[in-house]
Structure formats: structure tokens, C-alpha cells
Amino acid sequence: MSPIRIATRRSPLALAQTRQVASHITTATGREVELVEVTSLGDQTQASLKDFGGVGVFIAAVREAVLAGQADLAVHSMKDLPTATHDHMHLLAVPPRAAVNDVLVSDAGRLEDLPGGATVGTGSPRRRAQLLAMRSDLQVIDIRGNVDTRVGKVGDTYDAVLLAEAGLGRLGIADRITEVLSTDRMLPAPGQGALAIECATDQRDDFHDLAAAIDDPATRAAVTAERAVLAELEAGCSAPMGAEAVIHDEALLLRAGVFSESGDQVLRSEVSGTLEQAEKLGRQVAAELLNLGAGGLLGDSGK
């Protein structure tokens, strides 16, 4: 039987997480896997994600490899996946999720240890807004580049950087983390810590057994709820909003927030229900946020 070909970006993080998926597939199915590396638009520019639009910039080239027959599957970071349904691609599986938290990397230690005026690097309007809500005395500066590149700038260009805990863990550099920020302090991006495995829609039946072996229903329900908030708000992955769904004993608790860029305005909503209601709960939270004025804070962010 021929190997399963998986399309992935060439970045160190994308390769690391795709290799984890490949190992999972081989263990679960016995099939060999080979990686097909592609370069996305998001990898080719150092411009701010906010400036050139965050929706789909890390996704399109990977999907094209599948649709062109160069690969069988595509692996993405779930938080990069557009919420709009693709006519020719199918979300085949969502493996178990890694940590959802954001983390600080700094020679100073914890966030409270940073002196006033300290420089903090992040490319995320969501992180920027929530950081300024906690510490308005900090200088938050845009940063691009791979995770290891950003970490390497600490102590030189920046006093600290904010990153996703999952990324540092997958790269094997979690020892650089100096503080894990609780989701009560910093809501994660919808889908943060989760991966998305796609196939061509007309081939979904060919991978039915593979999907059954590696899909995690709880993670799928959680990210479905979070992404429903994002979709209903008509916001993109670069928007200053966060969402987290937590599952306990078949119950799903969804929290979401929308923030002004300066962090001085924060709107929050939460709701609970069953896993089967995941998408409905996401729409419900988004409707409440819109009633509170979220549309004015989001503006055209990420649309």
C-alpha cells in the first residue's frame, strides 16, 4: 500500500506538528506517511498579519497541494483555518488538543516582574489587547518570524515575547517559558492548541477509517464552539477576540471576549450546554457579544 502523503508548511513548527500527526496515523493505522512541504503566503512576508489580512494566508498553498493531487491530506494549525466552508476540502479529523494557554518568555521572569516601559513582542492583536488590559505601561511591539526566531530575540530586541504554549511544546523548547498565563487572564484564540486534518471532499470516504482512529470528539466539539463565535462575529484570525470551550462530564462551557486594540474596553460572555450544542452555543455567545457592542470594537478586523 502506498504511503499517505501529507501537505504541510515548511516552518519548523508546522513540520514538528505534522510529524506528530504522521506518527499518530502510523500508530493507529499501520500506514506509512511521507511529508509534502509547501511555502505559504504567510511564510513569504514579514508584514504584520493585521496589515495584509490574516484569513487563510497560511492555508491556501497547503490546500492547493491536496487539490492538485500532490498530497492526500493537509495539516494546519486550527487557529489558522478559515471558518468559511471550502467547496472542495473536508475537515477529516481533529486530533486531541495540546495546551490552549498563551505564555511569556522573558529574562525578567513573570509578567509582573517586567518594569514599566518594557518591550513585549507579539504579532497578535488579541494578545496585544489583553496584555495592555493587564499592563498598560508596557510597550507592545509587532513581531514576525518563526517561534524559535521570536524566542531568540528575547534579551536583545525585546524584553519579552508572548507565544502559544502548544507551539513551544511541539518544538521541544518549553523550558524557555517563564510564565504560563491562565485563560482567565488571557483568552486564547479560537482553536488554539488544536490541529486540523483536511482531505479533498471527494476523497473523504477513502479516509473514513483513518478519521475514526485519530479524531477526538471532545476536541472537535470545543473548537466547533469556539470557531462558531468567530464565524458569527464575522471576524478573522487576526481579530482582537478570544474564545475557550472547556468540557467536563459531557458538558461544554464556552467563554469568549472581544477587546479594543488599546485594551481599555473588554466585552465578555459565557454559556454552557451539551457537546451536541457546540455550534449553537458559539452563535449564542457571539450574539450576546454583538448586543454588547462587539461590532464596534472589531470594526473590519480580519474580515
Image (spheres, helix red, strand yellow):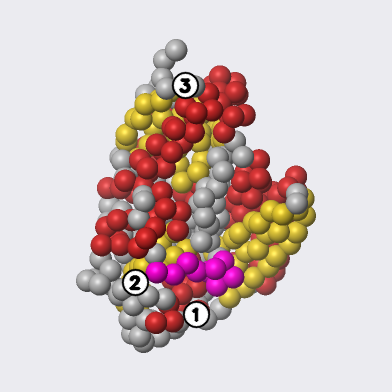
Circle nearer the N terminus (2, 3): 3
Viewed as shown, does residue 54 lie left or right of 206?
Answer: left
* Position in image of residue 139 (x %, y %): 35, 79
Type of amino acid at the residue the image marks with label 3: Arg
Q: How far apart are marks 2 and 1 (CA)?
A: 17 Å
Residue placed at 34% from the left, 71% from the top? 106
Magenta stretch, main secondary structure, is: loop
Residue at the far top in the pictured view: 1
Mark 3 is surrounded, within 10 Å at the Cα level, by few (under 14), some (14 to 19) or many (20 or more) other residues, namely some
Q: What element carries label 3?
A: loop
| Residue located beneath label 3 in the image | 31
Numbered circles on residues, count: 3
* Position in image of residue 238 (x %, y %): 46, 59
Label 2 close to label 3 by CB (< 8 Å): no
* Position in image of residue 151 (x %, y %): 30, 62
| Residue located beneath label 1 in the image | 134
Front position among marks 1 and 3: 3
| Residue located beneath label 2 in the image | 106
Q: Nearer the viewer, residue 94 or 111?
A: 111
The answer to which image quadrant residue 252 occupies is: bottom right
Is residue 185 one of those drawn in magenta?
yes
Residue 221 lies, with reference to residue 142, above or below; the image says: above
Q: Is mark 1 on a helix, strand or loop?
A: helix
Type of amino acid at the residue the image marks with label 1: Met
Q: Give the number of the disc on residue 80.
A: none
Mark 1 is surrounded, within 10 Å at the Cα level, by few (under 14), some (14 to 19) or many (20 or more) other residues, namely some
Q: Tell me the magenta residue range.
A: 178-186
Residue at the far right in the pictured view: 273
Q: Nearer the viewer, residue 49 or 23?
A: 23
